Amino acid sequence: MIMGESLLQYDFILRGVLGCLFASITAGIAGTYIVSKRIVFLSGGITHASFGGIGIGYFAGINPVTGAAAFGILSGIGIEYLSGKQKIREDSAIGILWAFGMAIGIIFIYLTPGYAPNLMSYLFGSILLVTKADLISLGILSVVLIAYFSIFYRTILYISFDENYARTYSRHVDFFKYLTTSLIALTIVLNIRMAGVVLVLSLLTLPPNIAMLFTKNYSSIMKGAVISGFIGTSIGYVFSWFTGIPAGAAIVFALVIIWLFANFFTSLKVKKI
Amino acid sequence: MNTLVELKSVTAGYGQKIVLEDVDFVISEKDFIGVIGPNGGGKTTLLKIILGMLKPFKGEVIYNDEFLKRNNIGYLPQMSLVDLSFPLTVKDIILSGLMMHKKVYGGMDRKDKERVLNIIRELGLEGFEKATLAELSGGQIQRVFLGRALIGNPKLLLLDEPDNFVDSSFENEFYIKLHEFNKRMAILIASHDVGTISAHVKSFACVNRRLHYHPSPEITEEQLSAYECPIQLITHGRVPHTVLGKHE
């Protein structure tokens, strides 16, 4: 009996630690890309559009995460493509997609007969409900992102800094742009389980912003974002476990506190000099 | 002088729109050519054709492989729309000029890092290796992009409106540098302001849909109007004076 209980507890803690670790790796790497390329709003669009996929997934009886992933990747690539054409106002397009995705999601969840799924867990996230399958896919994505960003580091970085110049030496600019956007969309979708549709964006933007207070070097920002993300999500997770507050909210709260502290700390340092 | 690249009856543009028509043009070693013409006349398009970024509708671009490979061209774009606060250091930005010699994967080696330090020294950017563009002045930013164009040791350097973002304090120094570079590479400099470049280039190419080559640095208003090249003209002399060319 006691053995069983402690095993259960062990499983719970392990799940939490792995969840926090994978979330901070994926969100830290993708977040650094998003923040430095100033596409936070685009990422918000992807996040909310993917909610449409969740709704359709429920309605059609397929895994909602699969639906969300398809919606997220397609909307990300779609926005990139349209903004490259320069015939459309990018921010308006994102705003429309943002609301449209949410509307589709709500409509299909409403139309789904029988048990209404726990909307709250998708909107605000719940580490406590993260499944083994979620963890495995986040773990695989972590490995893929680390490999992708280390092997193609300079290619990705230089395209994101100056796309037009990159076109003078490379024929692969569009390929890498769309591939990176797809991986960002996947990161967002898989982290929705952790932090929820409404709050996942801050999981991506806060850690790089904390790291940027200390360094201007892209790869150091990535590492710093992963570390500060891990600290923030862990604190939030523990807090959420003891108080029952939704994990997403607890994590964002912890990250904002860290960000405020970091700001205070760096401002002290500047004054000394 | 050996020919580096030759354009043969090149017609080019974007979509349905023709910007350059039936252009013949030869660039040889040690050339220092000013590409002049009105805005929208096709200067940038010409550079993109030479660079191989844009495929011509008609005609051909022939590189003399013995002296110039396509990846041996340095390029300074018109004030690019880069985000100055992007977290990328001066050193890394200059290193990106080597990407045309690199595979899409992998990093830079020690030789590359030595090269970047040499370029930084040559352009007087010491102390800014780890700075981002947001911490630099306009002239310094231009030098960083010039460094990016130079680090690959190009045989041909293409400069698109470099005076757009140069600060006047650096202008003189900039052209002195270009004369130095000209000893080891051909230079093509596009500008809508003949005045600034006429004192430095060896010859002119006037681009306004068609291209007229003018093999000496002296160029008169009559010649320009004959070329239908309505641009500002400054004639030579100890004290340069401005004459405004007639518009079409």
Image (tube, coloured by chain):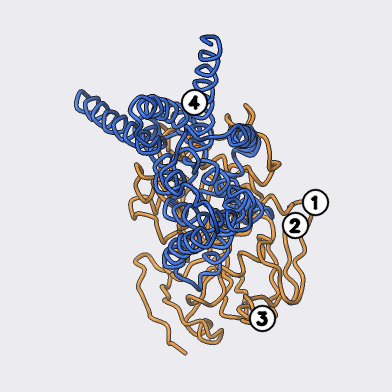
Chain colours: A blue, B orange
Disc 1 residue type (three-letter)? Glu
Q: Nearer the viewer, residue A4 or A143?
A: A4
Q: Are marks 4 and 2 on the same chain?
A: no
At x 33%, y 31%, the residue is A254
Counting residues from the N terminus, which is met first, the one under dot 2 or under dot 1? 2
Q: Is residue A235 left or right of residue A116?
A: left
Q: Which labelled disc corresponds to residue B66?
A: 1
Q: Is residue A116 left or right of residue B50?
A: left
Above or below B210: residue B185: above
Picture quadrant where residue B60 is located: bottom right
Label 3 or label 2, whichever lies nearer to me, is 3
Residue at the disc numbered 4: A16
Q: Which labelled disc corresponds to residue B11?
A: none
Label 4 or label 2, whichever lies nearer to me, is 4
Spot the residue most to the top: A2
Q: Are marks 2 and 1 in contact (CB under 8 Å)?
A: yes
Q: Residues within 10 Å of mark 2 (few under 14, many from 20)?
A: few
Above or below B158: residue B20: below
Q: Are marks 4 and 3 in contact (CB under 8 Å)?
A: no
- Identify the chain of the residue marked 1, using the numbered disc in the image: B
Q: Residues within 10 Å of mark 1 (few under 14, many from 20)?
A: few
Q: Position of residue A167 (x, y in %)?
A: 62, 56
- Identify the chain of the residue marked 2, using the numbered disc in the image: B
Q: Which labelled disc corresponds to residue B2?
A: 2
Q: Nearer the viewer, residue B72 or A148?
A: A148
- Identify the chain of the residue marked 3, using the numbered disc in the image: B
At x 34%, y 34%, the residue is A245
At x 52%, y 30%, the residue is A19
Gap in angstroms between the C-alphas marked 3 and 2: 26 Å
Q: Are marks 3 and 2 on the same chain?
A: yes
Q: Tell me the element at label 1.
A: loop
Q: Nearer the viewer, residue A57 or A100?
A: A57
